[in-house]
């Protein structure tokens, strides 16, 4: 009964979020995010109908995991949207982010190639939960890289983007941890049921975060200084580097004495 | 497939970063509006390093010898406590100055078109190393007292001066940049 209430409340929250997104013209600014929410809403409704009309759990699982896989793929666009919107005014930091994300995807690609080479049946033997956990972990790593860059370069966030990052980051964080636990061989049916229930309950919390922060449009704060720094970067970086180097060598000498 | 320990580690890092992002949130927006109207590197409050004589005095054993000659246990105790506090305050000031150098660097360069990954990585590693050494110094003073880490006093003196010099150099570069920008506009 409680699960059903959570399910319905999630559908209501998703509908409200979409409504606010279109009314406040947020959907055009964050298309990937609102596409994801729309897809999750469709997934919820379809799964509800399948669960209601069919008593065959196999059909429900097929519908659920097909839609879930699509949702995870579409949600990759949210990571790119965070990068695009958050770093629009910071080309240098955006360049750093591109390199970092490229590095992450290269590592993931190499790991996948190694896995497939060492065990060709790896992909087919992996459970649906395991595949989603892996995809969510990749998203999580990309978000860690982006958030670390945002924090390091003190990139300011508007309320909307912060809400998307927080809600989506928490969703990804919870997803890959819970799915990894659930797909481990030691997880019993009770633990799996509990994790499935907690996933629904926490999703309602993430939707609430999004609803509060995306209720109305708020632009990202832009720095007022004009970007005339291109020619000066090498000089600034060289100065900072030289002085920090000096401090390090002096410090090493002092500690060694 | 990701293992459970790796998932937990990744989850913890992500969660902590998000918490940090959430807590920094509104302060950052407020700070931006006030900071962006003034040129960078102008706010030097609390950055002036201690004079070399003062730093040498904090870590030197001369005062301790003088106090111990009085033969008063209360005075010795008071001296140890106070001197340790002063030394810790100095370490705190130094690490704040290092943080400020790095923050000003990132604020000055984040809009730059040609940020270099290797250069930035080197700077981050240097910064992390210096912060680590400051942390070690902090622990050494707390556990052994300032007099026992006299070797680090040399570092203390030099580093403060060099950091101040770095501040000055960066300020000069930025002033030149703004001057150049004003000329070309």
Image (cartoon, coloured by chain):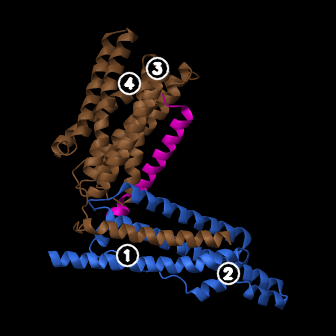
Chain colours: A brown, B blue
Q: How many marks?
A: 4
Q: Quadrant of residue A137?
A: top left
Residue B142 visible, this angle? yes
The Cα atoms of the two marked residues, 4 and 3, are separated by 36 Å
> In which chain is the residue bearing label 1?
B
| Image position, residue A159 (x, y; %) | 29, 53
Q: In the visual, does B57 lie left or right of A55?
A: right
| Image position, residue A113 (x, y; %) | 42, 28
Could you tell which of marks 1 and 2 lies nearer the N-terminus?
A: 2
The Cα atoms of the two marked residues, 3 and 1, are separated by 54 Å
| Image position, residue B76 (x, y; %) | 78, 83
Residue at screen point 48% across, 49% down:
B16
Q: Which residue bears the numbered disc 1?
A: B170
Q: In the visual, does B103 lie left or right of A36?
A: right
Residue at screen point 41% across, 40% down:
A140
Name the one closer to the observer, A69 or B54.
B54
Q: Which residue bears the numbered disc 2?
A: B59
Q: Which region is colored magenta?
A: B1-29
Residue at screen point 41% across, 67% down:
B103
Magenta-highlighted stretch: main secondary structure?
Answer: helix
Q: In the visual, does B17 lie left or right of B83?
A: left
Query: Which element carries disc 3, helix, strand or loop?
Result: helix
Q: Which residue bears the numbered disc 3?
A: A122
| Image position, residue B45 (x, y; %) | 43, 80
Crowding at label 1, few (<14), some or many (≥20) Cα neighbours within 10 Å? many
Q: Quadrant of residue B170?
A: bottom left
Q: Which residue bears the numbered disc 4?
A: A4
Tag in front: 4 or 3: 3
The Cα atoms of the two marked residues, 4 and 1, are separated by 61 Å
> In which chain is the residue bearing label 2?
B
> In which chain is the residue bearing label 3?
A
């Amino acid at each position: 009964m409680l699960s059903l209430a959570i399910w319905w409340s999630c559908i209501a929250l998703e509908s409200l979020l979409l409504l606010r997104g279109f009314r406040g013209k947020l959907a055009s600014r964050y298309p990937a995010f609102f596409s994801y929410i729309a897809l999750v809403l469709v997934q919820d409704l379809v799964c509800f109908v399948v669960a209601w009309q069919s008593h065959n759990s196999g059909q429900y699982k097929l519908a659920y995991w097909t839609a879930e896989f699509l949702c995870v793929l579409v949600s990759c666009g949210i990571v790119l949207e965070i990068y695009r919107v958050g770093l629009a005014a910071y080309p240098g930091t955006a360049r750093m982010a591109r390199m970092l994300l490229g590095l992450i995807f290269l590592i993931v690609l190499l790991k996948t190639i190694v896995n497939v080479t060492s065990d060709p049946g790896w992909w087919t033997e992996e459970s649906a939960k395991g595949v989603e956990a892996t995809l969510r972990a990749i998203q999580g790593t990309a978000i860690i890289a982006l958030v670390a860059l945002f924090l390091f370069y003190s990139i300011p966030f508007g309320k909307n983007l912060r809400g998307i990052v927080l809600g989506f980051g928490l969703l990804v964080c919870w997803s890959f941890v819970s799915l990894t636990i659930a797909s481990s061989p030691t997880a019993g049916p009770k633990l799996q049921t509990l994790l499935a229930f907690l996933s629904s309950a926490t999703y309602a919390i993430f939707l609430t975060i999004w609803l509060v922060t995306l209720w109305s449009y708020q632009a990202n704060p832009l720095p007022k200084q004009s970007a005339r720094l291109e020619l000066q970067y090498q000089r600034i970086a060289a100065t900072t580097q030289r002085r920090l180097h000096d401090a390090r060598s002096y410090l090493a000498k002092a500690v060694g004495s | 497939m990701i293992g459970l320990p790796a998932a937990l580690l990744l989850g913890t890092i992500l969660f902590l970063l998000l918490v940090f992002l959430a807590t920094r949130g509104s302060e950052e927006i407020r700070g931006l509006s006030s900071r962006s109207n003034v040129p960078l590197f102008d706010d030097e409050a609390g950055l002036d390093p201690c004079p070399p004589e003062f730093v040498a005095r904090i870590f030197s054993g001369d005062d301790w010898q003088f106090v111990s000659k009085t033969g008063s246990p209360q005075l010795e105790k008071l001296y140890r406590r106070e001197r340790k506090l002063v030394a810790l305050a100095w370490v705190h000031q130094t690490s704040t100055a290092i943080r400020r150098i790095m923050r000003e660097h990132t604020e000055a360069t984040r809009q730059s078109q040609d940020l270099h990954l290797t250069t930035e990585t080197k700077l981050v590693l240097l910064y992390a190393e210096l912060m680590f050494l400051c942390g070690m110094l902090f622990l050494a003073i707390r556990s052994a007292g300032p007099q026992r880490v006299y070797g680090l006093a040399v570092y203390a003196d030099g580093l403060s001066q060099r950091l101040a010099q770095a501040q000055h150099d960066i300020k000069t570069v930025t002033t030149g940049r703004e001057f150049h920008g004003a000329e070309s506009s």
